[in-house]
Image: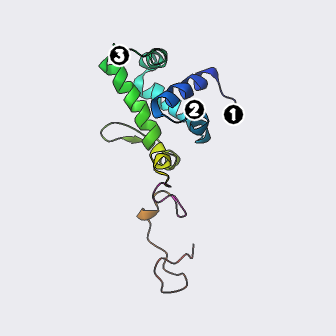
């Protein structure tokens, strides 16, 4: 999928907020998804203001702008939009959360069984002692 100017601007903003390079963010495959979530959750006006003002940040940033920047950062690190309860974007977003990359870990329950595997009854028909068999 070609990268649009809007996606490029969002990636640059996100790199500045997260400390991860643009290539690392794009490698998640979630840049367009996260941009859409940010626009939807913040609103078009506040989103545009965030893009504009964080190119030239100064000490006069107001609380709304700081909250918007924190929310986008939270989105990248957790795969969720902050709130009560947080809005989890997708199982893929959870697995690609920057928190796991920063810690050098894979997200729990994403390999090999997958996100949400803890909610399933274990398959006990595998070889051995029958505990945690892999008869899937």
Name the secondary structure under disc 2.
helix
Tell me residue 79's x, y (percent): 46, 42
Quadrant assignment for the N terminus:
top right
Between residues 107 and 88, which one lies in front from this camera angle?
107
Q: Residue at x 52, y 81 (%)?
A: 125
- Asked if the residue at tag 2 contacts the one at tag 1, i.e. Cβ–Cβ closer than 8 Å, the answer is yes
Quadrant assignment for the C terminus:
bottom right
Which mark is on residue 32?
2
Q: CA distance from mark 1 to mark 2?
A: 10 Å
Between residues 24 and 108, which one lies in front from this camera angle?
24
The segment highlighted magenta reads 106-114
107 up-or-down from 72: above or below: below
- Check disc 1 and report the residue beneath it: 1
Locate residue 130 relative to residue 135 in the image: left or right. left
Task: Classify 10 Å Cα crowding around label 1: few (below 14), some (14-19), many (20 and above).
Answer: few
- Check disc 3 and report the residue beneath it: 61
Q: CA distance from mark 2 to mark 3?
A: 26 Å
Name the secondary structure under disc 3.
loop
Task: Classify 10 Å Cα crowding around label 3: few (below 14), some (14-19), many (20 and above).
Answer: few
37 up-or-down from 131: above or below: above
Tell me residue 100's x, y (percent): 47, 49
Magenta-colored stretch includes residue 56: no
Tell me residue 3's x, y (percent): 66, 28
Q: CA distance from mark 3 to mark 1?
A: 34 Å
What predominant SS class does the magenta segment belong to? loop
Q: Residue at x 55, y 75 (%)?
A: 134
């Amino acid at each position: 999928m070609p990268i649009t100017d809007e996606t490029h601007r969002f990636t640059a903003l996100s790199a500045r907020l997260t400390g991860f390079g643009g290539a690392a963010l794009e490698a998640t495959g979630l840049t367009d998804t996260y941009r859409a979530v940010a626009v939807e959750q913040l609103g078009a006006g506040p989103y545009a203001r965030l893009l504009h003002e964080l190119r030239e940040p100064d000490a006069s940033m107001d609380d709304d702008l700081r909250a918007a920047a924190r929310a986008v950062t939270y989105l990248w690190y957790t795969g969720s939009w902050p709130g009560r309860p947080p809005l989890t974007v997708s199982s893929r977003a959870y697995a690609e959360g920057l928190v796991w990359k920063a810690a050098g870990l894979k997200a729990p329950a994403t390999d090999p069984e997958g996100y949400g595997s803890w909610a399933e009854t274990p398959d006990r028909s595998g070889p051995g002692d029958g505990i945690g068999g892999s008869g899937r």
